[in-house]
Amino acid sequence: MALLRVLTWGEPLLRKVSRPVEVAELDDNFRTWCADLVETMYEADGVGLAAVQVGRAIRVLAVDTDYGESNVRNPVVYVNPVLERSGAICEDSEGCLSVPGVRGKVRRPATVSISWLDMHGAAHRREGIEGLEARCLQHEMDHLEGVLFVDHLSPVGRTLVEGKLRKLAKAAKE
Ligand code: ZN
């Protein structure tokens, strides 16, 4: 297994819209790469990681929001996920492996449902997901559209992190 390099703020690929994965692409090579994506997520202490964050603009996410508490690895790889949002809007603090050292409050709907393919092409659906997992799935889905959590910050929240973002962007150019 290989660890992948996580792109950081200022790298242009993070702003790209990811393309759907073709079913014909779901081969052993693809699954090995997904295992690397999952391994990279755990190694970086992340609860989620989108493929585009490690250099492939395809609609694939790895998520495991329970590992920090349970210490049992139970990763889910979502291929071509489709998300529906519902419920009240809640605000909570977020961070991102691609924006290291930056945190901020983001408002998002509390509940999501998700449909996706697994790495073998089988279709799945889960409804009524709440809490950290719902927040994480929305954060990761944003990556597939080239959106980063700092885009959702209030003007004041954005001002607070602007200095750190400038430093990250400078480092990304070097
Ligand atoms: Zn992120």
Image (spheres, rainbow, N blue to C red):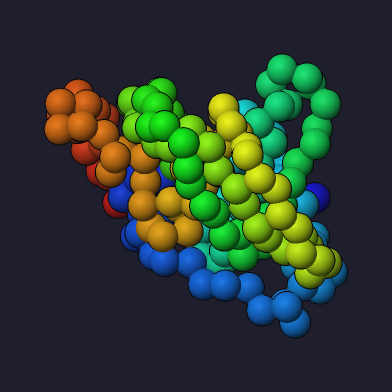
Residue 66 appears in the rendering: yes
Residue beneath the point at 40% across and 27% down: 90
Q: Residue furthest front?
A: 87
Q: Is residue 166 left or right of residue 135?
A: left
Q: How many marks?
A: 0
In the rendered view, would you say 100 is above or below 26?
A: above
Q: Position of residue 91 (x, y in %)?
A: 37, 25
The residue nearer to you, when weighing 52 against 149, is: 149
Residue beneath the point at 75% across and 82% down: 24
Residue beneath the point at 73% across and 78% down: 23
In the rendered view, would you say 123 is above or below 138?
A: below
In the rendered view, would you say 116 is above or below 151?
A: below
Q: Position of residue 52 (x, y in %)?
A: 51, 58
Q: Is residue 57 left or right of residue 80?
A: left
Q: Position of residue 80 (x, y in %)?
A: 62, 65
Q: Residue furthest top?
A: 69
Residue beneath the point at 83% across and 26% down: 72
The residue nearer to you, when weighing 149 against 34, is: 149
Q: Residue furthest bottom?
A: 24
Residue 101 appears in the rendering: no
Q: Position of residue 79 (x, y in %)?
A: 67, 62
In the rendered view, would you say 76 is above or below 158?
A: below
